[in-house]
Image: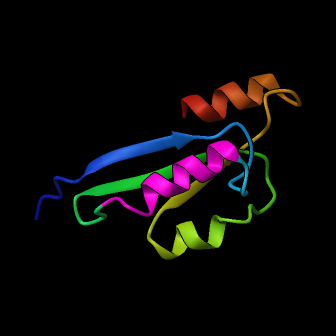
Amino acid sequence: MEDNRVRILYVNGGLMDRGGVSSVMMSYYLKFDLSSIYVDFVVHGSTTGERDEEILKRGGKIFKIPPKSKNPIANYTCLKK
């Protein structure tokens, strides 16, 4: 069976907390029809964000990569992957 859902990748400069960019991402994410799209998130940092549990409950994936300021080569490598 073929899955024709569209894939969306949100890239956030930090964690999925309650800040401005994260809040905008989440407001869209919560309104998306998840039967027709997949939504995944890239966050910069290895700790858990305030919204991670909510994302995971709705079927999203969270990819944690090293912050660019701490390790630019690892950041680029992980983001490209």
Q: Quadrant of residue 53?
A: bottom right
Where does the magenta region start and end? Answer: 20-32
Asked if 8 appears above or below 58 in the picture, the reply is above
Residue 54 position, x and y percent, is: 57, 72
State which quarter of the image contains the C terminus. Answer: top right
Residue visible at 24% across and 66% down in the picture: 35
Q: Is residue 17 left or right of residue 56?
A: right
Residue visible at 22% across and 54% down in the picture: 5
Residue 63 position, x and y percent, is: 61, 51
**Residue 24 is inside the magenta segment:** yes
Q: How is the image coloured?
A: rainbow
Q: Quadrant of residue 16?
A: bottom right
Asked if 78 appears above or below 20 in the picture, the reply is above
Residue visible at 67% across and 25% down in the picture: 76
**Residue 21 is inside the magenta segment:** yes
Residue 22 position, x and y percent, is: 64, 49
State which quarter of the image contains the N terminus. Answer: bottom left
